[in-house]
Amino acid sequence: MFSGLVECKSLVTSVKPEPGGILLEIQRPFTFDDVQLGSSIAIDGCCLTVIEFDHQHLSFQAGEETLSRTILGKCQAGQEVNLERSLQLSDRLGGHLVTGHIDGIGQVTQRRDHDQWSDFRFSAPTQLMRQMVSKGSIAIDGVSLTLVDVSDSEFSVALIPHTLQVTTLGRLQPGNQVNLETDLIAKYVQRQMQS
């Protein structure tokens, strides 16, 4: 479980195809001093398991299911990604409950910059739009955000200067794709309403 409060950005050092998926290697942040084999880390919002590590790198495998639902398969060496370690039960939950299980891919349709702030519009699959509501929560590339406007096919968010600076969202432009995870509670409510 994660909070959607990105701890840092880091660089992808290599992406290697392997049977059934890819091997993803990321530069290890110096603050990630408690990493162990099997640790769960959200990479652009996608929960992956550490399979190897040393003082400089963290390695992960991503299979076909993960690659079909996320943009991780498009990662390239030198690209920045958002990182967050999994929560401990004693941690404060400053964002919202994020599982790290990506629901689908969205696309930036508009970016408007106002001084140091930015407003973004994203398109998303219809089934995900049904789980969104104005003032609800969404995780975009692992970043917990508040929804502003929600229509049948698009939603908007407003990003403060801090978020633009400390996450990869500041580089987004129209046409870019992102990982989306809708609110966990909204999924359960929708399921109950359908039953």
Image: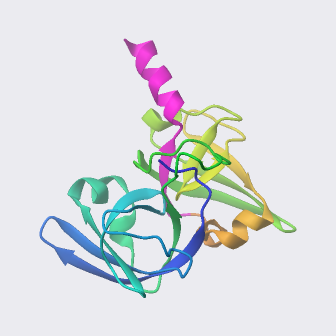
Q: Is residue 194 above or below residue 163?
A: above
User: Which residue is at the front of the view, 114 or 131?
Assistant: 131
Q: Is residue 176 visible?
A: no
Going by the picture, which residue comes out furthest to the right?
115
Residue drawn at x 62%, y 40% is 137
Which percent across, then down, holds residue 79? 48, 80
Residue drawn at x 55%, y 41% is 97
Marker count (numbered): 0
User: Which residue is at the front of the view, 135 or 33?
Assistant: 33
Which percent across, then down, holds residue 80? 52, 78
Quarter-of-image position of residue 41: bottom left
Residue 176 sits inside the magenta stretch: yes
Q: Is residue 167 above or below residue 105?
A: below
Q: Is residue 45 visible?
A: yes
Quarter-of-image position of residue 59: bottom left
Which percent across, then down, holds residue 94? 68, 48
> Seen in the image, is 170 located left or right of residue 70?
right
Q: How is the image coloured?
A: rainbow
Going by the picture, which residue comes out furthest to the left?
19
Residue 63 sits inside the magenta stretch: no
Q: Which residues are magenta?
A: 175-195
Residue drawn at x 31%, y 63% is 38
Quarter-of-image position of residue 31: bottom right
